[in-house]
Amino acid sequence: MTTQLPHWDMSVVYPGLQSPEFEAGFQSLVAQIDDLTALFDTHGVGAQPPAASPEETVAAAEAVITALNSVVDFAATIGAYVHAFVTTDTRDTTAQAANSRLDQQYTRLSLLETRFTAWIGALDLDALIASSTIAADHAFALRQSARTAQHQMSPDEESLAAELSLSGSAAWTKLQGNVSSQQLVPIERGGEMVELPMSAVRNLAYDADRDVRRRAYEAELAAWQRVDVPIAGALNAIKWEYATLARRRGWSSPLAVSLFDSHIDQQTLDAMMTAAHESFPDFRRYLRDKARLLGLERLAWYDLFAPVGESRRAWSWDAATAFVVERFRAYSPRMGALAERAFRERWVDAEPRVGKRDGAFCMSLRGDESRVFANFQPSFAGMSTLAHELGHAYHNLNLAERTALQSEMPMTLAETASIFCETIIRDAVLAESDREEQLAILEASLQGNCQIVVDITSRFLFEQAVFDGRVERELSVAELCDAMTTAQRETYGDGLDDAALHPYMWAAKPHYYSGGRAFYNYPYMFGLLFGLGLYARYRQDPDGFPERYDRLLSSTGLADAATLAAEFGINVRSVEFWRASLDIIRSDIDRFAELVG
């Protein structure tokens, strides 16, 4: 990677973190939260609403909802701005200081949202929705708040929990992110020892040379071992806090909270997981075919991302971005314009570098603008990841007409557009490829699908085991490693060499360290299979689909997953739907096997 890869442009918001403009924006946020607090006090927004006439209640609710939407929107922009600096250079002490200041304001806002939730739960919600257009427009979010109110602790307890999270889960989350991203990993390259960022070492898993992959894998494991005690401490603390709060709020389990937040029910999760487990023999067949193609008896963990086939195109940054714009435009002019704008206005930070975190994500910045974080590599996989994250940006574009409360979508639906866009690119490349390139593209696609179905299931099983064990005591590094490899054996089975798994994947994946959520895994599988199901319907009946699809994306915060899916004739509680989506992947596995020969 070189400096030719773009860094995102945040100057359109503020000139810099130390600029007077940013300080003025920050102080504006403080003032807005102060004003919102005063408004809440005026209308008695808390556990019990004051005695008021129906007209007064409607007026109060409309004023509070409107003001809350405005402050949450502004806070999201400030937060995204600061996050852009923290994630691209975790050594930036100015950014870390700004983030810490912002955390305090987020805590204040969180307390107000808790008060709002309790207040909504105490109102006659049906009467309010029937009497107010603003309330009716936010009906789903308000009903979700009313259900959440049934699981709130006392106001003082909720306030204490929010304040203590700054030195609890939020602090542990930062620790894992900072330790992981700032590691310089010693590794032998070209006959001499060098130090590379963890993200660069993990990217070597895609190298064509097996010896390079093996040495990177061994160097990575050794690096995690050097910092495993503090990271294990972070994981233990975060899971204990989450489980404790779930219990104190009256939830049956951490998973029950996750299902509610994901806008699905246990029946939906069980149906999807049943279909996923049924598919494991097919994925293991793919892994064995890949091993045969590489001349191996069985794949080691460090072979999972080994390239196979040969692409005639190197997929440089310029080539990848041009192709994405072209293919997005072929689907719809609106999607193509979004991609073109993202590259023209420098929404993307693509260069891997020291201090920058690993992985990729997209965050909404303001209005219809997003920012895409990537560690781009010149390959089909790099382009596919770029298309995936731009799918999130397209989703944000469709949500731009919604208020903050209307835009609070669950992770299960958050992956819908990204998977759809990724599939557009994959099918476009396959359609114009020869055998060798088809092999490479199919393998890259199956590689990603295997991660989302098989590896995500292993992460789900691991997290469930951690929650189960953490109820009684802290789990040691050895126990966490054992739980991780046990979950990998249960899912990958004989598709991988049992002696070369990844015991430290719990340290490498930041998803486990999100203090505000648990089971940051199965929603990705939901997103993949739901996205594939929608794409299949697009291929069957493309006329008018883009408009209907845009309406779906715009509505992901307005109803639960089952209701939205039903508009496309999809029953997410049926195992058959998930099997049908997995059949699309099975057909790719069959095609891959034919190409391997």
Image (spheres, rainbow, N blue to C red):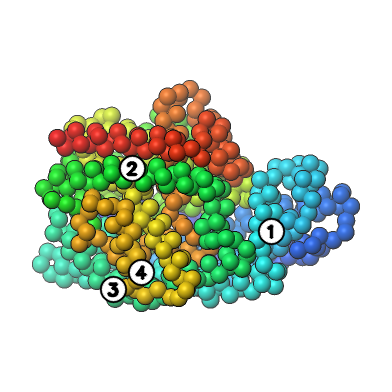
Q: Distance between the residues labelled 3 and 1?
A: 42 Å
Residue 225 has which mark? 3
Ranked by sequence position, the earlier of labels 3 and 2 is: 3
Q: Mark 4 highlights which residue?
A: 480
Q: Mark 1 highlights which residue?
A: 149
Between circles 3 and 1, the one closer to the viewer is: 1
Under circle 1, the secondary element is helix
Give residue 166's position: percent from left, percent from top.
55, 73
Marks 3/2 in contact by CB < 8 Å: the verdict is no
State the residue in front, 263 or 164. 263
Q: How crowded is mark 1: few (under 14 residues within 10 Å), some or many (20 or more)?
A: many
Residue type highlighted by circle 1: Ala
Give residue 209's position: percent from left, percent from top.
14, 54
Between circles 3 and 2, the one closer to the viewer is: 2
Q: How crowded is mark 2: few (under 14 residues within 10 Å), some or many (20 or more)?
A: some
Relative horizontal placement of residue 540, taking residue 383 as reference (left or right): right
Q: Residues within 10 Å of mark 3 (few under 14, many from 20)?
A: some
Relative horizontal placement of residue 561, taking residue 337 as reference (left or right): right
Q: Which residue is drawn at 55% across and 42% down?
A: 561
Residue type highlighted by circle 2: Ser
Marks 4/3 in contact by CB < 8 Å: the verdict is no
Ranked by sequence position, the earlier of labels 4 and 3 is: 3
Query: Relative to 356, is 441 above or below?
Result: above
Give residue 215's position: percent from left, percent from top.
17, 64
Marks 2/4 in contact by CB < 8 Å: the verdict is no
State the residue in front, 401 or 304. 304
Residue 279 has which mark? 2
Q: Distance between the residues labelled 2 and 1?
A: 39 Å
Quadrant showing the N terminus: bottom left
Q: How far apart are marks 4 and 3 (CA)?
A: 12 Å
